[in-house]
Amino acid sequence: MSRVWNFSAGPAVLPEEVLRQAADEMLDWHGSGMGVMEMSHRGKEFTAIAEQAEADLRELLAVPANYRILFMQGGAIAENAIIPMNLMGDKRVADYVVTGSWTQKSQKEARKYAEVNIAATSEASGFTTVPPMADWKLSADPAYVFTCTNETIGGVEYPFEPDLAQIGRGGVPVVADMSSHILSRVIDVSKYGLIFGGAQKNIGPAGLTIVIVRDDLLGRAMPHCPSAFDYKTVADNGSMYNTPPTYAIYIAGLVFQWLKRQGGVAAIEAQNIAKAELLYDFLDGSDFYENRVDPACRSRMNVPFFLKDEALNDTFLAEAKAAGLLQLKGHKSVGGMRASIYNAMPLAGVQALVDFMRDFAARKA
């Protein structure tokens, strides 16, 4: 069997080592006589899997003891509603920093549950940069400040961690959608009130949403918040209030163990820097392709690029597919191309892409 280089933005590439282990355990997990997707979520076998996954994630991100890790469903899009339903409490306004397609959707959804203040936006730049914190205009008493620290579609990543203490608002919780770059770089969890992300981009299969929430933010849910989406209810029940996405949690746990074997988040960050530099250096040196994102805010995970002659787009994609390079078409809302080079994409895959792009340019220029 020949594996392709899969540059999909999500669901995305998983470590081959993890897939092989899952295949080996498909029919019989550790002598239990059954596969993980057949297990009761309350049985001792799956309880052990879930507890280990949570412990490994806590270790990888150095999650402080006063934060809860929740395994939920609904994806990051559902969290756009679940967050205001849980965090508004007796507040009236939530602040949003809009840096691309996902934060546009997030603030639109939040308006169903709260008054939204756009604290900052990079729309004037075509969402190619991140507004510096000095330019953020927070409301007087927001329940939280919402950010998306890596915009998957536009390829824009925060070059800083949003520490509101720097602008004299340290008491306001920062919420961060980290769906497409969680575990790709070292972060300080204590700077955030809540971190969330859909697993299907950089952790595991679709179906699992990870939420990391500070203890003091629990218990604020609106009366009409569904019980299964009430963070306190989920936390009090160890993410087992309803049947969680068991197989997705299992695969995520295998990915966490794989990350630990790579040396942890700091080690994988070094690899991600090398991969991103290889691709961006090529793009910057090319007259055939271009990346339009502010160099200071370029994503290490999602690299959008354009052929300067876009009439060649279909030919590029067809030849790339023939060369074993798949899922390079950009999001329909922005066009062009996009290479997602998550943790599981090895340097060899990025090198194969660069080699193909160089050859294509030489033949078509």
Image: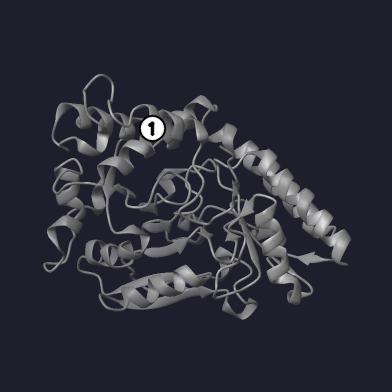
Residue 263 versus residue 188 in the image, above or below: above
Q: Which one is nearer the viewer's eye here, 186 or 351?
A: 351
Q: Amino acid at mark 1?
A: Ala
Question: How many residues crowd around disc 1 within 10 Å: few (fewer than 14), some, or many (20 or more)?
Answer: some
Q: Which one is nearer the viewer's eye here, 341 or 4?
A: 4
Identity of the residue drawn at 58% across and 67% down: 154
Identity of the residue drawn at 16% across and 56% down: 228
Residue 185 percent across, percent down from the top left: 55, 43
Colour theme:
one colour
Q: Where does label 1 land, which residue?
A: 22
Does residue 300 appear to the left or right of 9 in the view shown? right
Identity of the residue drawn at 55% across and 40% down: 344
Identity of the residue drawn at 58% across and 36% down: 268
Q: Quadrant of the N terminus?
A: top right
Regarding residue 139, the answer to whether it shows in the image is: no
Residue at the far front: name it. Answer: 1
Residue 195 percent across, percent down from the top left: 38, 52
Q: Which of the 4 image quadrants contains residue 128?
A: bottom right
Q: Quadrant of the C terminus?
A: bottom right
Does residue 305 appear to the left or right of 308 in the view shown? left
Residue 158 versus residue 259 in the image, above or below: below
Residue 265 versus residue 96 in the image, above or below: above
